[in-house]
Image (spheres, rainbow, N blue to C red):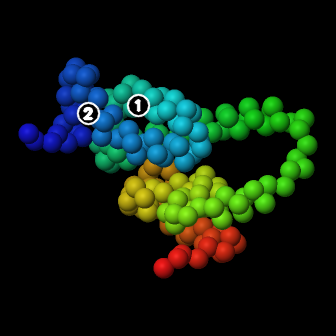
Amino acid sequence: MKKLTDLEIIDSILKGNHGDFSLLIDRYKNKAFSLLKRILNNEMDAEEALQDSFLKAFNSLNSFRRDSKFSTWFYRIVYNTGLTVAASKKRKIEKEMSSVDDHFDLSAEDDMVYATTDNAKEYIHEMINKLPVRHALVIILFYIDNMSLNEISQVMDISLVNTKVLLHRSRNALRDLLLKHNYQEVI
């Protein structure tokens, strides 16, 4: 059986075969969910944002211009949805926590998390999660999801030059974080 391309599936959906959208969902749900989990740090919020992203994509499918890959277009929807949810969560938390004193020292707990992580890959992912969202996302999209710089610039809606600069700064921030926590890969 021939594997349909994204464009063939989209053409079918636009002709009225709405059930074919499930093919796109199956194809992109795992990477999109992973991206949203990184942005939101919460599986339930990520699941909800993923559903919103697919709904937005389905409702906007007729405006897909085909000047980029569907995956790039869709990941931009996912990225923007994740940022919107994260911003609203942050506003809600700030509102709830405005009366709480900020006198907690979490550095000891922070060191413990890294000291008990045996798996190097898991450790690196923990460190990536400590980076600011944009820095973490550019590293994830480039190294884990294997997206090109051009695709990342489209997803994040920034210029190619800014994408390169952001990736460079993100690498440096990750390196500094690893050095700060004395990361040494066991050989």
Rendered image quadrant of residue 117: bottom right
Q: Which residue is mark 1?
A: 54
- Residue 132: where, in percent of width, then height? 64, 55
Q: Which mark is first along the chain, 1 or 2?
A: 2
Rendered image quadrant of residue 141: bottom left
Question: Is 85 on the left-hand or right-hand side of 32?
Answer: right
In the rendered structure, find residue 23 and report the number of the disc placed on it.
2
**Label 2 crowding class (10 Å Cα cut-off): few <14, some 14-19, many 20+?**
few
Decide: is 62 above or below 166.
Answer: above
Q: CA distance from mark 2 to mark 1?
A: 12 Å
- Residue 22: where, in percent of width, then height? 29, 29
In the rendered structure, find residue 7 and report the number of the disc placed on it.
none
Decide: is 163 above or below 99.
Answer: below
- Residue 44: where, in percent of width, then height? 55, 32
Q: Secondary structure at mark 1?
A: helix
Cβ atoms at labels 2 and 1 below 8 Å apart? no
Question: Is 22 on the left-hand or right-hand side of 53?
Answer: left
- Please report the residue visible at 25 percent of the width from the left and 22 percent of the height from the top: 19
- Please report the residue visible at 38 percent of the width from the left and 38 percent of the height from the top: 29
- Residue 66: where, in percent of width, then height? 29, 42
Q: Secondary structure at mark 2?
A: helix
Which is more toward the observer, 169 or 103? 103
Amino acid type, residue under disc 1 in the picture? Phe
